[in-house]
Amino acid sequence: MSYPMRSQLQGPRPAPLMINKQCSTKKNNPQPDPIIVYLRSPEIIQVKPEEFMDIVQRLTGKQAGDTIGSSLS
């Protein structure tokens, strides 16, 4: 089995490639922060730590008995 000969470079060697400094330092523009538009003013509710979970569930529409385990049965 004969191996093909490697072809030699014909003529002058090409100039080495260079990285344009402007391209390498250019960063993508960061996305602007989202704009929050409230339909109504947010309420401030004072609660005790032990009441917090019940209040959150009541305000978000979840019943206190709704859990992942009870919904699977």
Image (cartoon, rainbow, N blue to C red):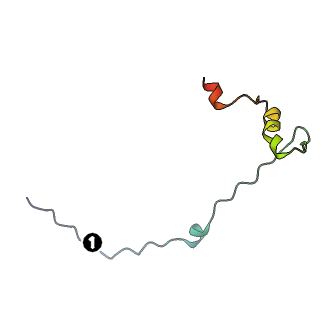
**Residue 3: x, y in percent?**
13, 62
Side of 18 where 12 appears, left or right: left
- Quadrant assignment, res 45: top right
- Quadrant assignment, res 62: top right
- Quadrant assignment, res 51: top right
State which quarter of the image contains the N terminus: bottom left
As drawn, the residue found furthest toward the left would be 1
What residue did someone put label 1 on?
Answer: 9
Label 1 element class: loop
Measuring 69% from the left and 58% from the top, which residue is drawn there? 30
Measuring 80% from the left and 38% from the top, which residue is drawn there? 56
Between 60 and 16, the residue placed more toward the observer is 60
Measuring 64% from the left and 25% from the top, which residue is drawn there? 71
Side of 4 where 46 appears, left or right: right
Between 45 and 49, the residue placed more toward the observer is 49
Side of 32 where 42 appears, left or right: right
**Residue 43: x, y in percent?**
90, 42
- Relative height, residue 8 to residue 38 (above, below): below
- Relative height, residue 3 to residue 8 (above, below): above
Crowd band around label 1 with a 10 angstrom C-alpha radius: few (<14), some (14–19), many (20+): few
Between 37 and 69, the residue placed more toward the observer is 69
State which quarter of the image contains the C terminus: top right
Amino acid type for the residue under numbered disc 1: Leu
Measuring 81% from the left and 48% from the top, which residue is drawn there? 35
- Relative height, residue 17 to residue 38 (above, below): below
**Residue 58: x, y in percent?**
82, 32
